[in-house]
Image: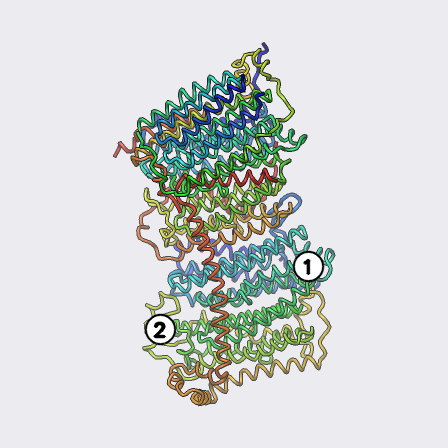
Amino acid sequence: MPILVPDINLRIIAPALIVTVTAIVVLLGELVTPAERKRWLGYLSIAGLVVAAFAAFSLWGANASGFSGMVVADNFGLFLTLTIALSAALSILLSIPFIHAHEIDQGEYYVLLLASVAGMIVMATATDLIVIFLGLELLSLPLYILAAFQREDTRSLEAGIKYFLLGAFSSAFFLYGIALVFGATGTTNLAKIAASLAQSAGSPMLSIGVGLLMVGFAFKVALVPFHWWTPDVYDGAPTTVTAFMSVAVKAAAFGAFFRTFQFALPALALDWRAVAAVLAVLTMTLGNVAALLQSNVKRMLAYSSIAHAGYILIALVAMSANGLSSALFYLLAYTVTNLGAFGAVIALSDGARERLEIKDFAGAAREHPLVALALTICLLSLAGFPPFAGFVGKFLIFGAAVETGWAWLAVIGVLNSLVSVYFYLRPVVQMYMSEPAEGWSGIRVAPLVALALLIAVISVIALGVFPAPAIALAAGGLIR
Amino acid sequence: MLTVNHFILLSAILFCLGAVGVLIRRNPLVMFMSIELMLNAANLAFVAFSRYLNNLDGQIFVFLILTVAAAEVAVGLAIIVAMFRARENVDVDEVNELKG
Amino acid sequence: MSLLVFYLFAAIAVLAALGMVVLRNPVHSALSLALVFVSLAAMYVLLSAPFIAVAQVMIYAGAILILFVFVIMLLSPGTDQGVGALKAQRGLAILFGAALLVLLIAVLGGAVLPPTRGTFTPEAIAAEGDTQAVGALLFTNFLLPFEITSILLLVAIVGVIVLAKKRQSISKQ
Amino acid sequence: MINYLWLVPALPLAGAAINAIFSRKMPRWLVSVLGVGSVGLSFLVALAEFFTVLGAGAQGVFNVSIYSWIPVGNFKIDVAFLLDPLSALMLLGVTGVGFLIHVYSTGYMAEDESYGRFFTYLNLFVFSMLILVLGSNYLLMYVGWALVGLCSYLLISFWFTRPAAAAAGKKAFITTRIGDFGFGLGVILIFVTFGSLNFADVFARAPQMFQLGAPIITTITLLLFAGAVGKSAQLPLYVWLPDAMEGPTPVSALIHAATMVTAGVYMVARSHVLFSLAPFSSEVVAVIGAVTALFAATIALTQMDLKRVLAYSTISQLGYMFLGVGVAAYGAGIFHLMTHAFFKALLFLAAGSVMHAMNGVIDMRQLGGLRSKMRWTYITFFAAALAISGFPLFSGFFSKDEILAQAFESGHIILWAIGLLTAGLTAFYIFRAFFLTFHTQARWTEDEGRKTESRHSPSSVVGHPSFHPHESPASMTVPLAILAVLAVVAGFVGMPSVMGPNFLEGFFAPVFGEAAAAIPAGTEWMLIGASVAVGLIGIGVAYWFYIASPEIPVNLAAQFKGIYTLLWNKYYVDEFYSAVFVEPGRRLAMFLWQVIDVQVIDGFANGLGRAMASFSGALRGWQTGYARAYALLMLVGTVIVIGWLMLR
């Protein structure tokens, strides 16, 4: 019997590996860290993420594949890895004071968050459907628990159980889709699927499999009509967890979504592009319109995140190199912008008492002018208002759509972003144009939150005014 | 003659039964069991394809999925228990504080 | 012969699955599910996958289901009463479940597998030994997925502990 | 000097940034110095740039790339500025008038508690407007376009404690966004068609790629014009502008008279290459411009609120500008834009000065007889009124005359006639406002001042409990005086050929090409005569009814309806209309305002909002909170998706 040697290439999974190791170290550290020093576990987690980001940087341009074609380190995956690491690091900065104020400062919080990050990185760099599935599960399971992390709060538990039940439900569809694709092509490797489809036409079984895969991805990135969990879960989960999952899950899931559909299934593009275009229209429209009447900031941002998934889907419909890079840029822009918005919301909270109703923001500009300014910038960026990151992102995506003959989709996108301005400005109006509500005095913004906010806002402005370097990085995203 | 289609049709039936089970039951435990049924349907499809494609990968997937299911069950049941502790009730229809 | 066995166990599986869905008492549902698991294990044997069949019985019927039953006992929930708040839910669920089934049957009934075939014929597997073959693949080509599942299990453990254990900060108060 | 062009927008931006972050911790004088100084310096740089362009003559077109902004593949968009005679003149207008209004604001807003916020917004506005004007591609123009809209919104609702102000801000934002959508689509279509958004590329390729009247160019220009209609308050999207008067008066002067609202005219002039290729679009521009001019002027006749008169007057004058650019008289349109900036800003600032003196009262039924109380305001308002009426040798005379002459010469006789009629109405309503405010007997007393709800800054109510009309401080009157001088003399840069050299035509040659053949002297004189006559008649009628024989309308009114005599004692102005226009005319004017303006168009905007809200509510209804319902909806979605994929 021959000696079997597995194809081990630790270097290309270094970012995920470092994050995992960090998680385990934090888990062990939790045992020896006294309650009042828990924040050090947060710092340790950030350090691990920074190292992982450096590892990702060092792999830039490597374009290496490993573990029998299961994962790849291409610039596309690395860009997403960096985005995910950035979102995690910023989320942890926000979390350290937050979980302390809410008396949930357990080291496991960071462990779960890091494990989720590892799953996201796996998902973003996976080139095999089964690894994508495992990445999906590894990112989801910790999030189910994180959503329910405020166990004493029935809303948090409700978020957890809804997310879990619907997530597991959609996972089953996704898995069944993988099974059908496996049956129709004899493989789950993306490159081999593409090769197989290049030789022979698709079959009805494959179409159903592809449809089910789309349902699975659509659930994770919250596309209409698979988005129902989003507002409720975002609303109920601890705000920092909401902030994290609103951006990072999208980055990871869209990464796998693009890789699977654009790279492995171009042969069926005629079919799925039409479906995706319709989903994009539904998603943008529903997300924006439903957000119009929301009075709670978290719910509003939840609907907004649905709408943004719709915009990003346009880039997939475009199915071009520019579409791909525009999606990457958009994800990065959305990450910093949305985290900035959530950061500002957290900054305006009064210890454990959060201000989540839009009317609670009344007069914030007078008490916290800089936080108000930061929130305004982030909301304008979300609305696609120039000259912030969101504007450039939308321009790139709509441009990619127009280039590939999907101008009508871009038109609907533009129309939608016009509608969105209305609800994004509501908190701004409250902050600047209302008499201050009671209870503002004596609230100090935690330094770590301020730091995260500063990083986010500077990024939002920089990505809007000087987007060229980020666009160049995103453009290197070669899919394998 | 037993063909792959026999097995896939069975798996399709089980999958749809599981999906319907998720929708019509109000006990989260039974909903969750229905989801397990859906996963099992997928497993059956994998093994059937594996056998008729002479490709062992499908069996490996099933092995991996078994593990994933185990992890999922642990987490899911923990959440359900936590919810029960908080509200002494396991009807998902009662869990609708968050809406709109 | 094998066709007969298939239909026998298929019938058991479908009826048991149906039972799981419709039986009001969660314990009965769980027991029905056990029956589905076992009949699926039989299917795996039919499909020349004895290793998976054993794993199926051990993990699903032996571990997962036991866990379910434990929790059912722990929570002792009542039976589902009536249709609840969602009046049209049941009818629509059955309607669309049926629609999905029709779609799946229409396609999968006549599905033809691609011509590319692997080397693992039932004979080849039998010669090498099912467990050896699966094991060899698992630790070579599928090493990475295998390792990911290990992390997944770790996460599950941590998660369960988080949701179950007493909080330090709460005992502090 | 070209290398310092970036300073023009950068200075106000820096002012805005510093004030935004530190204004709460800084003394007021420092806020003023930063706010006013940055725009002042910007003006000086702009002046230098202007002379650079002037000196370069026919070569006076500079493309200054600052940096590469959005490079995607082989397509890239730079942050680049286009400095040519057109933008240079606009720069001067924006920074110059902007500077004067900033100075004025230091007096006008002196007692407002949100002093720093005001200057932040104002500086940000100037920056945005400069980006709009300087951008050398449609995307950068769009950036400025969107930002000025935002600033306008922020400034209209500046006194947010008044519900009317907040509602007006919202209305302005929503209405102009409708136009912006058209503009955005136009930009997308330009990109699709030409593969570039740079003015230079687009304008170079357009004549090569397309014949005159090509449908695609017509579509693009109509979409662009939709943006202009929203931004420049033309029919049917003008409704936001009168309400925008809820903002502080300097804002009305700067944004809603002198600069932002003219952006649409600028954009059409900037895109003149495209519009020249689309005769149909140009025709649409001209017709909408002329109709708006007349329509808004008739509404102005009925208004009692001085600022609203000026707002409708602005809409009407913008209509003239569009009439100008619509008949391909781009230089004339921009010329009127410039003179209008001076006299309309002046009218607004003077009105603000009146408000300042009268403790926020702006209803002309409560004014009157202010001539002796406010000498400077009176004189400058008078100069501006003469200018807008087209009184010979005042600035409006030259610019309005040129537009009308070009309209006539290009064969648009009907549009010319409409323009001429509007000129008469303009002269009438502006002098009506002038007489009612400054002449006639005072219709205010100490007591009335107390009863009147302040329309000025709410904080100032406490400061001035009683009515003591007084001249405003020097910080307000000096800008008035400077603007008055400009409003009087600015017209001489563009004299009709029969009267002297037209400097402006030569100046614009690098942008708009050589001027069309001169109009025959006889026709020219005839046209001049007609507009002068109409203007004088308008002034004369106003004088006759309000000053010379105010009892005539009284008698007329009594004759027509005796019961009005009683009412007349209270509102003699209203009855005057009954007499002059005799019911039908008055009804028409009121109908235009109340039915079309208030009900149809407002109703549409509000209805749209309500429809969206109910749509949103319906969507929320789906979000039931039941996990099982969500799962069902997901299953439905799945069935549809795979059913579709299968059946294809």
Residue tagged by mark 1? Answer: D215
Q: Amino acid at mark 1?
A: Pro
Residue A126 visible somewhere in the drawing: yes
User: Please, which residue is most extreme toward the left here?
Assistant: C173
Location of the C terminus of chain A (image quadrant): top right
Image mark for residue D452: 2
Q: Nearer the viewer, mark 1 or mark 2?
A: 1
Question: Looking at the picture, does residue D465 appear above or below residue C29?
Answer: below
Q: Residue A351, position in %: x, y?
A: 32, 43
Q: Amino acid at mark 2?
A: Thr
Image mark for residue D150: none
The reply to whether label 1 and label 2 mark residues of one chain is yes
Question: Looking at the picture, does residue C98 appear above or below residue D513?
Answer: above
Q: Residue A251, position in %: x, y?
A: 51, 37
Q: Secondary structure at mark 1?
A: helix
Q: Residue D145, position in %: x, y?
A: 55, 58
The reply to whether callout 1 and callout 2 are in contact (CB within 8 Å) is no
User: Please, which residue is most extreme toward the top here?
Assistant: A1
Tell which circle, 1 or 2, labels the residue nearer the N-terminal end.
Answer: 1
Task: Judge by depth and name the residue closer to the eye, A59 or A162.
Answer: A162
